[in-house]
Amino acid sequence: MVPDHDGTGEEPGPRSREGTGERPEQRSGEETGERPERRSPGESSGSGPAAFDAGSPGEVPDFVAARDHVRSELVRFARALRRAGAAVPANAATEAARALVETGFEEDRARPALRATLVTRREDLATFERAFPEFWRRLTAGLDATGPADRPGPDAPDGGLAPLGGDPPAGEAPDPGDASDDGDGEAEATISRLSDPGEVGGVEDGEDEEATASVYSRSGRRTALSVPPSALRFGEGDLAGPMRELTRALSGLQGRRWVGGEGPELDPRKALRESFGTGGTVLNVPRRARAESDVRALLLVDVSQSVLDTLDRGFLLRFLHRARAAWRAPRVFFFDEEVREVTDEFDAPTVGRAVAALERAEAEWGGGTRIGSAVRTVTDTPGAVDRVTVVFVVSDGLEVGDVADLERGMADLSRRAAAVLWCNPLAASPEYEPACRGMEAALPYVDGLFSFAGPDDVAEMARQLRLRGPGGSVGYEYDPRRDRDGRSSGTAPGSADGSTPGPVDTDSPMEVDNA
Amino acid sequence: MTEHERSTGFGDVTEADLREVFEAEDYVADEGIVTTVLLALRLGKPLLIEGQPGAGKTELAKVLAGGFDTELIRLQCYEGLAAENALYEWNYTKQLLSVQAGEDGVGDGESVFDEEYLFERPLLRALGREGDDDGTGDAGSAGDGTDPETAGRPPVLLIDEVDRADEEFEALLLEVLSDFQVSVPELGTVRAETPPVVVITSNRTRGLSDALKRRCLYLHVEPPSFEKERAILERKVPELDGAVAAEICGAVQRLREEPFLKQPGAAETIDWARAVAQLRHDGEPDSLSATEVRTTLGCLLKEVEDVQRVDDDLLSALLESAEQARHAVEESEEAEAEG
């Protein structure tokens, strides 16, 4: 242990490096590439690219150009991964470059090295594996003895992987980010597709990689949405993190944990600890309070056909089940033309009972939606809503009843609840605007209108609420994915297999968040 | 001093060295694991390992400590883990006694805020262990007359199941992991000359902060393939007949296709293989029987719903997979013998 007693910040010298074999590149502090520059061709790591181990006699490889090529390709690769939805840290390209210096340019070793530095989540591994071959091909092809291949300048669009090796194929636009580019890179096309917003329109014939899901257009007319199946799939575990974030963002009830600062309770342990510094005399009495870590909520779920056709039912049920497990006794109501409490159905360890409740609701009603009536019924239910309750309304806002009734109900609800959050599966579309009359009527009384089609939407809702709180500037209109790439990273509405919206395995156990 | 200006203590480790360590410690590692661990050692970056329970995450840290003959310092995370449990705590009783010992209390120039009154918890201890190559003798096993090549190695710090700890603890880790230093207000800044090898494991029960991930290399340990699992059993349960081990691996691979609450990991496979070996006499090479599987299923499945899921149909499917695996292995062995 080397304590810096005087606090001057003077650091002890590093251990002697002599004989440790440590490479100078490790201490460079700069972004990579120095290794290739200092190497002679004969020192390459075996099966590396041509720039490092080949080259005819007398032909001097352009190491500076090669180094720059590696740097820029790494940056491009990191950007491409980000645009495909992967969570790549800001310093990842730098770390990846350092890793490449260590491993050398042998694909079998470089791949795990880049995976370790660029990937931070399990769900991003598949994206990495899809994109890596194209990156590697570009990287190694550019490292020939004549220097890197031609590519667009530094101002090229972010993340797009440019056509390889000079001129693009005839008849092809040189835009590297062009999604229609089917030139010479399968991985490139894959990345581009992942980045595509869901285009409203027909599904292309023969495009069997894409699934079709039903969504509603702004005017309420059903149209087809072409969505890559990868965007429709998510595991049960994907909801755990977002729900935890949401819980933290909304927690308004005291939990069991203590926090320091101003509070109603004395903190004798801390007082005793501090008194040792003053010879046993207690100079001030610290206080503590219970941390606010619990959520009281009411979940009001529209189970009309229009919502269930749009929303993945498996996701909806998992969300409700997790909310029931993680929050403090939240109550769950299903409504269509009538309203019914289904709280108890979500206490079972499997989804079977909840699915049965959902199916009963469809069988009994299956018609239009009377949101106003449902809101008033729930508001009048004793103990359902109080000033610490966060109300979630899951609905598309397509009201068939009296809009004035809905307006009165929402006004009453917003006065009595801590916050009213409207989760609308239609808002998952980048073109969504709350133009239907029910939504227009409810909007002034809603603290936030969020898209609600998958775990990513829950994560985004939690992020906004944590940053700005329920009273702040939150909602679908502040969703950065709308502006950036048309919700490329969001789970599009619809089912996992794309054929029937929301299939649910009734035997599959719910994942319960123990925390 | 940045992290890259600091000696990692493992800058001279080569891939061959690492493979040798894994070999000696009977740890079966694929190319991805070897490369990632090698990078973590040479770059001096913490290694964040995620994967299902039983995938061998903790074992990896133990293997590194054992293989490089250095100390393993383990911090088991849990909800509510605070700085005083992870970093340091003042020995209040000793301080109080010191204050009260003399009539005039603590003399001039003395302080009860000294290392003498400090309880080192795992994180601080890991920073303090320099790898005992200066002969001071306070570095545990690192310098106790061991191989001079391994002397001077820093300890391996295992921060186990970090997802169980609160986010506040993650924030605490940031200073430790980025600068390998800890600020003790009363004492100053404690800084590791040679950073420890840090292995952080997570079972993914919650997401970790981006700030923490950014500081780490990431490794996701997948459930082992059939071949890898066979290699593991060959090393860990050598008393079991090879053909039976193949059957066990085949059955486990088939079992992992089922949507169980808790998928069996490599650790469960080893337990099961040991149980089967224990119940057999003299290494019987007979095929697995339905009764044998049924009675030892508790080694693999740890949830009652999962056990109930194994009905006669699934049991038959397991035995069929086991038999296929046995045939495949026997055929390949015959082909090798003929070749």
Image (cartoon, grey):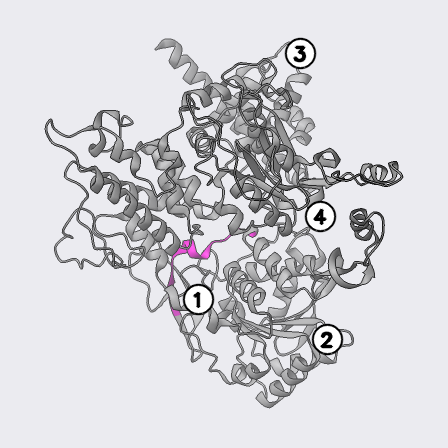
Q: In the image as oriented, which residue stretches furthest toward the left?
A: A58
Tell me which amino acid carries mark 2: Arg
Q: Are marks 1 and 2 on the same chain?
A: yes
x, y (%) of residue B150? 52, 19
For mark 3, what is the residue?
B281
Rendering quarter of residue B258? top right
Q: Secondary structure at mark 2?
A: loop
- Pointer 2 indicates a residue of which chain? A
Task: Kindly identify the amino acid type of the residue bearing the numbered disc 4.
Answer: Gly
Pick whichever of labels 4 and 3 is earlier in the sequence.
4
**Mark 3 or 1, closer to the camera:** 1
Callout 4 crowding tier (Cα within 10 Å): few <14, some 14–19, many ≥20? some
Q: Residue at x 60, y 62 (%)?
A: A246
- Disc sitting over residue A46 in the figure: none
Q: Is residue A320 visible?
A: no
Tally of numbered discs: 4
- Which image quadrant is residue B104 in? top right
Q: Which residue is mark 1?
A: A480
- Mark 2 or mark 3, whichever is nearer to me: 2
Which quadrant does the N terminus of chain A fall into? top right
* Residue hosting label 2: A387
The numbered disc on residue B80 is 4
Density class for disc 3 (Cα within 10 Å; few <14, some 14-19, many ≥20) is few
Q: Are tags 4 and 1 found on a single chain?
A: no
Closer-to-camera residue (A86/A368): A86
Q: Which residues are magenta?
A: A224-236
- Nearer the observer: mark 4 or 3; the answer is 4
